[in-house]
Image (cartoon, grey):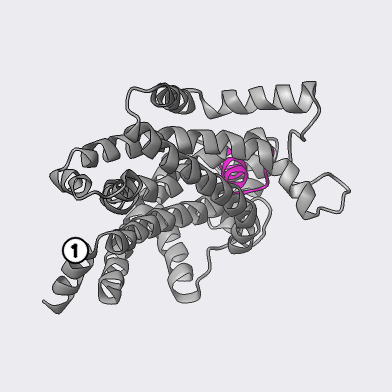
């Protein structure tokens, strides 16, 4: 298994390299540049050109890219923001914690809701519970995140005044765990509804496919209780396709974080991404794109590892491939 993981990381290096090349070209093809955000259009051309030289924007695109890549490979340096002149690495790390807290909480709650509800919906097919679960699932998928977020802000923050509408802590407050938790509730509800809505249907479909298998009929015929049949035999096999879907929730949540963090003014990666795009901060955008690509590859690798934990046959195939 370890050899397989190492090989997957080595294969991922060309993928990451290709992502950086494509992102670099697309950014340079887009209209505008960081210079437009830093200098006044009334400045003389000589001053504007001097600023381009200072930021390294006067060189050809391929020269700029290889300079960025050299600093990354040799020094692990993502450069400095062209707008704030802060280290890109420090900016990303300072915004990573709030995003991980938000997404991790939403992912755990979403899975904790989706799996039991999907299993119950499959075992009680066409019941009132099944119809209610499927209705809630379609609502969770169909209602846009920004609409649900604004609706929750209007009801719970503006009308009832139960919860804060933005930020991670109260300005000037102590910023304790209780304060963060109160600010976390509304954005987590939005993301959890989306995660649970997507995955309830997958869990239900996977369980329904397994429930009709012959080995489950044999288990029932031997006198096993339905609880053991469902949770020990059916659930373990149904988890294999579910793992694929859950493994891709991490990059999906990173994409959704851009909208949610902007709505709730959550100081995470999503808000940093949007502000970097609006200010055409090339260095920060490149660092964020590299981080996003790495997270997608890591999520796929984690999915493969979970496959082996769920199904020993897959682990044996990995070991056989490693020996060959």
Q: Where residue 259 sits in the image (x, y, percent)?
A: 57, 35
Residue that label 1 marks: 313
User: Which residue extends farthest left?
Assistant: 324
Residue at 45% over, 58% down: 64
Where is residue 172 shown, x and y percent of the image?
89, 48
Up/down of 73 relative to 113, above or below? below
Extreme-front residue of the structure: 223
Q: Residue at the far right: name it.
A: 172
On the rendered image, what quadrant is the C terminus found in?
A: bottom left
Task: Please say if 123 is above or below 61.
Answer: above
**Near-viewer residue (206 or 277):** 206
Queried whether the magenta region covers residue 276, the answer comes back as yes
Q: Inspect this view and state whether residue 60 appears.
A: no
Q: Residues within 10 Å of mark 1 (few under 14, many from 20)?
A: few
Q: Residue at x 65, y 50 (%)?
A: 83
The answer to which quarter of the image holds residue 221 is top left
Q: Quadrant of the N terminus?
A: bottom left
Q: Which residues are magenta?
A: 265-280
Q: Secondary structure at mark 1?
A: helix
Tell me where residue 202 sits by quadrant.
top left
Residue 227 falls left or right of residue 34: left
Give how far across and how far down residue 189 sits, in percent. 60, 36
Q: Is residue 229 magenta?
A: no
| Front position in the image: 87 or 113 | 113
Give the number of marks. Answer: 1
Is any part of residue 299 visible from this angle? yes
Task: Give the residue drawn at x 51%, y 53%.
Answer: 288
Relative to 198, say whether 68 is above or below. below
For this rendering, which residue is in front, 57 or 185? 185
Q: Give the side of residue 117 with respect to residue 243, left or right.
A: right
Q: Main secondary structure of the magenta part?
A: helix
**Residue 159 image point, x, y percent:** 78, 21
């Amino acid at each position: 298994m370890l050899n397989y993981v190492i090989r997957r990381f080595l294969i991922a290096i060309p993928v990451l390299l290709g992502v950086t090349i494509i992102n670099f070209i697309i950014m340079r093809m887009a209209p505008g540049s960081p210079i437009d955000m830093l200098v006044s259009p009334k400045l003389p051309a000589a001053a504007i050109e001097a600023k381009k030289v200072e930021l390294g924007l006067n060189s050809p695109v391929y020269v700029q890219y290889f300079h960025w890549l050299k600093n990354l490979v040799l020094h692990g340096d993502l450069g400095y923001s062209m707008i704030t002149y802060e280290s890109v690495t420090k900016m990303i790390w300072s915004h990573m914690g709030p995003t991980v807290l938000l997404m991790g909480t939403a992912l755990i709650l979403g899975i904790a809701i989706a799996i039991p509800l999907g299993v119950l919906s499959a075992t009680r097919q066409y019941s009132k519970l099944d119809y209610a679960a499927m209705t809630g699932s379609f609502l969770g998928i169909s209602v846009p995140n920004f609409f649900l977020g604004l609706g929750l802000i209007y009801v719970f923050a503006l009308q009832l005044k139960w919860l804060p509408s933005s930020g991670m802590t109260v300005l000037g407050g102590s910023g304790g765990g209780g304060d963060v938790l109160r600010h976390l509730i509304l954005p987590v509800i939005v993301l959890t509804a989306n995660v649970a809505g997507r995955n309830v249907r997958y869990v239900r479909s996977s369980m329904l496919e397994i429930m009709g298998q012959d080995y489950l009929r044999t288990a029932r015929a031997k006198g096993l209780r339905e609880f053991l049949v469902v949770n020990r035999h059916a659930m373990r096999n149904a988890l294999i396709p579910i793992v694929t879907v859950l493994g891709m929730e991490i990059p999906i949540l990173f994409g959704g974080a851009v909208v949610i963090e902007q709505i709730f003014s959550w100081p995470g990666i999503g808000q940093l991404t949007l502000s970097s795009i609006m200010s055409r901060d090339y260095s920060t955008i490149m660092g964020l794109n590299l981080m996003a690509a790495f997270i997608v590859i890591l999520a796929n690798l984690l999915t493969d590892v979970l496959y082996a934990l769920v199904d020993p046959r897959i682990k044996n195939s990995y070991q056989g491939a490693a020996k060959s």
